[in-house]
Amino acid sequence: MYQNNHINVRNLNVHFDNNHVLKNINVEIPDKKITAIIGSSGCGKTTFLKCMNRLIDSVDGVKITGELLVDGENIFDPKTDVTLIRKKMGLLSQRPYPLPMSIYDNVAYGPRIHGEKSRKKLDHIVEYYLKEASLWEEVKDRLKTPAARLSIGQQQRLCLARGLAVEPEIILGDEPTSALDPQSSQNIEQKFLELKDKYTIIMVTHILRQAKRIADYLIFIHLGEIIEHGPAKEILENPKEKKTKEYISGIIS
Amino acid sequence: MLLNKIIREKINSKLMLTFTILSCLLVVLIFFGLYYKSSPLFTNNSIKDLLFSSEWFPLKGKFGLLPFISSTIWVTLISVIIAIPFSLLTAIYLTEYADKRFVRMINPLIDILAGLPSVIFGIWGVIMIVPFIKNHIAPALGISSGGYCLLAGGIVLAVMILPVIIHVVSEVFRAIPQDLKNASLSLGATQWQTIKYVVIRKSMPGIIAAIVLGLSRAFGETLAVLMVVGNVVKMPHSVFDPAYPLPALIANNYGEMLSIPLYDSALMFSALILFVIVLIFNVISRIILVRIERSLGIG
Amino acid sequence: MDKRKIEESIFKILMRVATLSIVISLAVILISIIYKAIPVMNWGMISQTPQGGFYLGENGGVLNAILGSLYLATGATILALMLSFPIVFYINIYAKKGSWFVHTVRLCFDILWGIPSIVYGAFGFSIMILLGMRTSLFAGIIVIALVILPIIVRALDEVVRMIPQGLLDASYSLGATKTQTSVKIVTRQALPGLITAILIAFGRGIGDAAAVLFTTGYTDNVPTSLFDSAATLPLAIFFQLGSPVEAVQNRAFASALILTIIILSISILARYFSGKYNKFKV
């Protein structure tokens, strides 16, 4: 039923040297929804996320089998242009990593590396996406200052704007609020709820309450295996598997 | 017995402190020693004449060091200009692209290059670089050169400082967090774009420190340069001219320096110039590197 | 193919060329010396001191310089080691960690490390004149010890810094003093790194020329006491190459090969011992 979805995962297996980190992952991710990947730390949820934009490539000794289809194309196919895959996805990592340049250049970085040169267009893009990330009002008078001077909450919103500026279809969040204060976390969550009409959002979180607040769809991973996945409401209110029940009630964490 | 132990411990500690302070004082000691030995020179020659005059007539008491100073600067600059592209490209390749096994193969070779004595580089310069410049490079450009020239010195020095720059730059590159690179990669940047716009930019202070360290190494290098640079007291006008750097001046004349008045002072003054410049270079690069270490939370 | 991919491939090629050219220059240095040395190499070069007529191209070898260099480097390494242990122990075990004093000491050794050996030579020479000393093995040992002291201190410091605080605390909790801990625990822990540091410093001592030029002198005899002048290999090479006689010039290549072989054996040995401390230290 999800034939036309952006992301389909089939028999995905990931090994780090001799560790079998992800085992036979099969899942389809619904479009224009917030999908939360939950599970205890070390279960492989971040690895799963890193597979989607192939940042996993930079890890030493990694071996991947199976297929991860993005718009019907297997991204692990050696012929795939990895930069095009990544352009389709914006990433918010655990801690914000502003690039070593000004606020303006951070947002303009993506469009620029993909060949946009027109100053006028870039100005427009920067303003548009900073507004989209609700950061414009706070920084419009100091666009030329180094991004590192922003507060950590502002940096994370800058990273969101930077990610949106390459016009992705998908947003990946790797525990994007874990380094932020409660107010900034709430800003990001709010932002995700606003953005889900336009983007498919996949986020890893270890905060069950966060998943309850914003997720439409849940994937529960335990020790490298998907135990259960489905609409968030169903899973939270009526988990089918014993492990899921235990996780939700806090027995395993 | 216990008291004994405590007292001994105290003595040991103070003794070690003394050693430590004494060796650090060496820096100051060398400065004042060289200054003291070169001071007789200052009564007849102004510092300005010593540094900026090219009148070098030791028998008449004229010690204008400009030809030596400019030779040193030229040969150092040439070596760094040659070494920078090679060392940066190699460091980028070894840290960002190359296969781990390949890196493990190459690193020992770079270490060996770093460990070769300068006289070996000098011999190599005499065997290969000098004839190559004389017979191939200079004729190709329609210039006649004996081969013993600034360019020969620069090339030999460049190979000598390559390992220093590669080593420091690689350490700085390795300290860049993978997540920062991921931030760029995840926007669809190619690896090269990530290196160009993020890694190099973020490492800029470290790269500068590495180059300055290489500069200071090249500045004081003696024997290798001395053997290939020609040693003619004259302001060099092209890279194919022979030159006479400061360290070569000191090394070549140690034997006769006692027979001509003030000659020894002039040589000690040359050593002082070398010392001060190298000291400044070193302090600058170390301070940059320590800052980087702290800001990245390593070391 | 898009433009940025082409740029990346061009730079990748350039990087490979740069890396390769560094490896090739090392190979070329070694091969050119071997090539020039083989025709003039003979057993007499190693087993004999210069005989009458050596400097006209007749019989003899550089045994005086080989032994001179080995004596010099051995003496200097021992002296530098004796000085460096207390310093490294002090800044790592006794002094307060991360204090202003420790930073300054480390900076001082970075500076000393960077001072060109010709400056050490000139400084040593002026001290010798002050004291009315003649050139001797002894003077050379002291100056070379100063040149390699920062090398050993920095290398040793890096090794000792890596020793976990827990290990030291374990020793203290058994009632050991800091001195006992330093000597018994730290020395043992640092041993592999120490051996590497010693070998690198020893190699530097053998290869250095600029510092001994003024201080050790040069002689055709093997030194029999600390206060004799002594020949060294780098200077032997340098002087032979400067000779107007071609046969003597060619000997410089043979001497250079001997020096290269000594240095290479030392680096291979150092690499063998370095084990996990394979961070390159010069």
Image: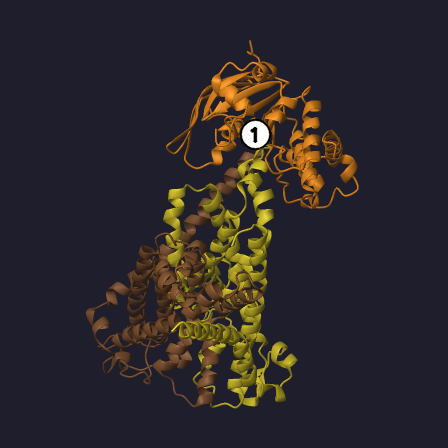
Q: Where is B229 relative to A45, above or below?
A: below
Give the image quarter of residue A165: top right
Residue A47 in percent (x, y) is at 49, 30
Q: Is residue C48 left or right of residue A40?
A: left
Residue C169 in percent (x, y) is at 44, 57
Task: Please tell me the colour of chain A.
Answer: orange
Q: Residue furthest top?
A: A1
Residue B178 in percent (x, y) is at 53, 41
Give the image quarter of residue A160: top right
Q: Which chain shows up in yellow?
A: B
Task: Please tell me the colour of chain C.
Answer: brown
Q: Nearer the viewer, residue B263 or A147?
A: A147
| Chain letter behind tag 1 | A
Q: Where is B249 relative to A90, above or below?
A: below
Q: Residue at x 54, y 34 (%)?
A: C5
Q: Residue at x 58, y 13 (%)?
A: A234
Mark 1 neighbour class, 10 Å CA radius: few under 14, some 14 to 19, many 20 or more: some
Q: Where is A168 relative to B173, above or below?
A: above
Q: Is residue A49 left or right of residue A192?
A: left
Residue B27 in percent (x, y) is at 53, 74
- Indicate the quadrant containing the N terminus of chain B: top left, top right, bottom left or bottom right: bottom left
Q: Is residue C186 visible?
A: yes
Q: Nearer the viewer, residue C143 or B66?
A: C143
Q: Is residue B152 visible?
A: no
Numbered disc 1: secondary structure: loop
Kind of residue at disc 1: His
Q: How many marks?
A: 1
Which residue bears the numbered disc 1? A206
